[in-house]
Amino acid sequence: MLSAESLKKIDREIAKYPPDQKRSAVMSALIVAQDEKGWLSPEVMDFVAGYLGLPPVLVYEVASFYTMYNLKPVG
């Protein structure tokens, strides 16, 4: 779903936190995903959740709370 380059960026963000605190990397991972895809579709958010090993609802909560994430395509 995301390019190898984007996954490397997410891995660098994950490495900043203890192994049991991957949830802390959600915001950074969503920014990387949005930079690549242009917006955060449900499929992209599901992929990010799976990559981080988190329930999708945790990713949806973050994405829907902050206005910096685009949940619809922008013109």
Image (spheres, grey):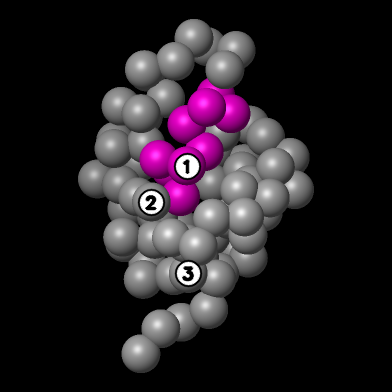
Please say whether residue 7 is one of the residues in the magenta stretch.
Answer: no
Q: CA distance from mark 3 to mark 2?
A: 10 Å
| x and y, in percent, of residue 62 in the image | 61, 48
Please say whether residue 25 is one of the residues in the magenta stretch.
Answer: yes
The image quarter containing residue 8 is top left
The answer to whether residue 50 is seen in the rendering is yes
Asked if the residue under mark 3 is in contact with the one under mark 1, i.e. CB atoms within 8 Å, the reply is no
Q: Amino acid at mark 1?
A: Met
Check disc 1 and report the residue beneath it. Answer: 27
| x and y, in percent, of residue 9 in the image | 29, 37
Question: Which residue is at the far left?
Answer: 5
Q: Amino acid at mark 3?
A: Asn
Q: CA distance from mark 1 to mark 3?
A: 13 Å
Residue at figure coordinates x 52%, y 11% from the top left: 19
| x and y, in percent, of residue 73 in the image | 46, 82
Asked if the residue under mark 2 is in contact with the one under mark 1, i.e. CB atoms within 8 Å, the reply is yes
Main secondary structure of the magenta stretch? helix
SS category of the residue bearing label 3:
loop
Q: Nearer the viewer, residue 21 or 4?
A: 21
Question: Neighbour class for label 3 at 10 Å: few (<14), some, many (≥20)?
Answer: some
Question: Which residue is at the far bottom?
Answer: 75
